[in-house]
Image (tube, helix red, strand yellow):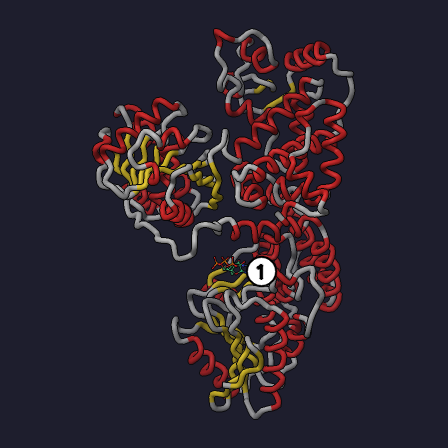
Amino acid sequence: MAAINEVTDLTHDGDVAVVTVDSPPVNALSSNVRAGIDTAVKQANESDATAIVLICAGRTFIAGADITEFGGAAKGPSLRDVQDTLENSNVPVVAAIHGTALGGGLELALCAHYRIAVPSARCGLPEVNLGLLPGAGGTQRLPRIVGVEKSLQMIAFGDHVPAADCHEMGLVDEMAVEGQLLEDATAFARRIVAEDRPLAKVSNLNDKLVADPQVFADFRAANAKKFRGFEAPEAIIQCVEAAVNGSFDEGMRVERELFTGLMEGTQSKAQRHLFFAERQAWKIPDVPKDTEVIPVESVGIIGAGTMGGGIAMNYANAGIPVTIIETSQEAMDRGLAVVRANYERSAKRGRFTMEEAERRIARIAPSLDMNDLADVDMVVEAVFERMDVKQDIFRRLDEICRPGAILATNTSALDIDQIAAVTSRPEWVIGMHFFSPANVMKLVEVVRAEKTSIPVINTTMQISKRIGKVAALVRVCPGFVGNRILASRRQVSDALMNAGAMPWEIDKAIFDFGFAMGPFQMSDLAGLDLGWVKEESAGRTIRERLNELDRRGQKAGAGFYDYDENRTPTPSPITEEIVREFAAKSGAEARDWTSEEIVERVNLTMANEGAKILEEGMAIRSSDIDVIWVHGYNWPRYWGGPMFWADTQGLGNVVARLEELTAAEGDHWAPAGLLKQLAEDGKSFSDF
Ligand code: 3HC
């Protein structure tokens, strides 16, 4: 074994040289890895090896460029240098793939002369998820092998394609037997030599590079909604167009130029921030890595309503049997019918077979008797939001459940300490705040109460991961983290409306910023009468007035907007008149509001609330708040989250604007102490 450097070895198996990369966790192309491969291949070329196998140790082939090095000074050979070394090797190079060959890893493998993979391997160019495009020839080489349409799909969506499909497309030349990649790759390399096969260069292939220009127009049109706001997909399409319309070198030039533009832009910075934020969120300073994970093999859900049913589906999807509790057969039947309809819809869309849907449904056992939860490992309570009801349930759970069962509540706002206090085991009580629809939305806010034990926190985070969620740990405060910031957004939106901005103007500004809908459309969808008490309603707010006119939202055919029979919203003259009336009463000067002003006010408030949350220790880090807003409220990924947004503005500017607004409109705009401190120190939230 000859070490080339600390992450690369060069060995010889008879006449075949083997270059092994061993750079955990994912063999990313750090400067060390690039230098190691470059030197090893050059050395192998100088030896009497007749072929070279490039393989990786550990869990995966090279998973891409090293994202942690982005933005830093370039060191050692560039990826393109290493690609040239591989492509110009005087003996055939075989890339041997297990795990994932992603991004720069696949782009490097595309410069080997041949590729072999085990069946469990996957290949992909997922740079789009980082707001980038494959910047090392991926957009030029992939279409030369798989054709234009397949490469558009693979690159613009970042699909991880299974090895068997790659083999069928010609991206992988040979399949290896699982568990014997090195042996099969070496044998394949010998066969290539014995058969005198050429030093195949993907860049020389041209016959798949034909496409009617309509293909690109159709692809753009078909995906316009999904790509809205994102810069990378359009740049990717332009690169593939360049592959079809010009020479390889010209295509590479276009790819480089567009890659550099994206790399320097805010969107990619935001999406890279989220890549790390999503991984960071699992790490909890006072929960050491070796903390016990309590086995959870059965779960009870209380409530078969919209939330309970959706939560049950998450567990059933992960293979965990669920006992679901309702108080009446009628409510149970209604809830389970919705669960069944959801599964059938997914099966019809081809997400899984109908048999699989039936298997999942069969994992959900209905019961009208809470005593059936005596032996479960975990309970998630999902009944409606009333403290006395929840406390009553937890008293009963305390009597029924075996010691050592985790008792979780799906409350979205209630004080979990008060819920835990009615049990004799508050250390086993925790919050699991799912977002609606719970079977679709990725986020779970895991809420640690005052006395929740460390193993219970750890297990709840782990189980959230197991059921496919993105979790962030928060503490108990009104609305926790997500809804507390949502409330601040609603307040500022209402204030804008009271000052004469029309709900649809505000919604449009928020939509154009990248949300699926604005706060007033959201209110109409949820129902304006949420929390409205008819008897107490006295026309004090615009919402009260609308409710009094029976404009209770979409379900009533009218709310802030008017709705037709297809639930298409149009601005309502009635709402407009009420808004004008309130604005006149408030003494607000009649003026037009620009989208920029609206977005700025909304985001400033959200970031300021986030700063207060951090200051009070309710969230661990600012990036967790970003994760919560991206996965729980569909904050546009390319804006990184409200805290990242504030960082991009510069916290000094954020504080200055908040102070201007405080002077003009009052103390509710006053910047949080933490925000002022960070700004004074020239720092950003990401430094906190
Ligand atoms: N660079 C640096 N670190 C990386 C990395 C990368 N490309 N990919 C993963 N990591 C790190 C993660 O941050 C994580 O670190 P942590 O343990 O300190 O939190 C660790 O590796 C393990 O990652 P995961 O937790 O994600 O492990 P999984 O097993 O769940 O997933 C994976 C593995 C599928 C490889 C996933 O990590 C992944 O999708 N990685 C990113 C792949 C990617 O986007 N590649 C393209 C990079 S850009 C590029 O190549 C540009 C080129 O075109 C020029």
**Quarter of the displayed picture in which ligand 1 can be seen:** bottom right
Relative horizontal placement of residue 255, taking residue 640 as reference (left or right): right
**Residue placed under numbered mark 1 in the picture:** 125
Point out residue 299 in the picture as x, y percentages from the top left corner.
30, 41
Residue at the far bottom: name it.
Answer: 48
Beta carbon at label 1 within 8 Å of ligand 1: yes
Q: Residue at x 64, y 39 (%)?
A: 674
Point out residue 368 in the picture as x, y percentages from the top left corner.
24, 29
Say which of 599 and 193 sits in front: 599
Say which of 153 and 586 sits in front: 586
Q: Is residue 684 above or below residue 546?
A: below
The answer to whether residue 221 of the structure is visible from this angle is no
Q: Identity of the amino acid at label 1?
A: Leu
Point out residue 66 in the picture as x, y percentages from the top left corner.
60, 64
Q: Is residue 206 above or below residue 389?
A: below
Q: Residue at x 64, y 36 (%)?
A: 607
Judged from the image, the secondary structure of the residue bearing numbered disc 1 is loop
Say which of 447 and 453 sits in front: 453
Say which of 331 and 386 sits in front: 386
Residue 38, image quadrant: bottom right
The answer to whether residue 343 of the structure is visible from this angle is yes
Q: Residue at x 53, y 19 (%)?
A: 528
